[in-house]
Image: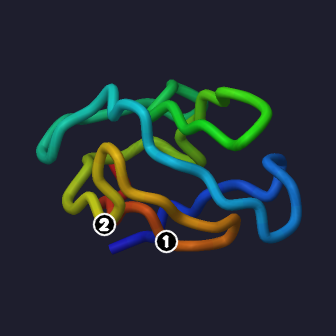
Amino acid sequence: MNEIVLPKELGEDAESSVVLWYKEIGDAFEKDETLLEVQTEKVTFEVPAPFSGILKEIKVHRGETAKTGDVIALAEVA
């Protein structure tokens, strides 16, 4: 399994809230395809897939928060 982390582009130690997952467990995705939308205090940000794969586990669900660098999902590389 490969980890999908909240990207550092949001800012160092920035806390973000998950607004919406565009993919569900078992869905395939392509590199750079939007996986989810998160919101910080200042901005809403679309998180692209770092690689192509199949979503296996969501660790941070809608309405939950995470910091940059936190593992938000696990995926199998396609």
Q: Position of residue 47 (x, y in %)?
A: 59, 37
The percent coordinates of residue 52 (x first, y second) are: 45, 42
Disc 2 residue type? Answer: Lys
Q: Residue at x 35, y 46 (%)?
A: 63
- Please tell me the numbered disc located at residue 36: none
Q: CA distance from mark 2 to mark 1?
A: 7 Å
Q: Is residue 10 left or right of residue 29?
A: right
The residue sitting at 53% across, 47% down in the picture is 51
Contact flag, marks 2 and 1 (Cβ < 8 Å): yes
The local crowd at label 1, few if under 14, some if 14 to 19, many if 20 or more residues have their Cα within 10 Å, is some
**Residue 8, relative to residue 17: is it above or below?**
below
In front here: 43 or 28? Answer: 43
Query: Would you name the residue on which mark 1 appears?
Result: 71
- Report helix, strand or loop for mark 2: loop
Q: Between residues 69 and 29, which one lies in front from this camera angle?
A: 69
Whichever of callouts 2 and 1 sits on the residue coming sooner in the sequence is: 2
Q: Position of residue 2 (x, y in %)?
A: 42, 70
Q: Look at mark 2 in the image and give the residue it sits on.
A: 59
Q: Quadrant of residue 30?
A: top left
**Three-letter amino acid code at disc 1?**
Val
Q: Secondary structure at mark 1?
A: strand
State the quadrant of the N terminus. Answer: bottom left
Question: In terms of image quadrants, where is residue 64?
Answer: bottom left
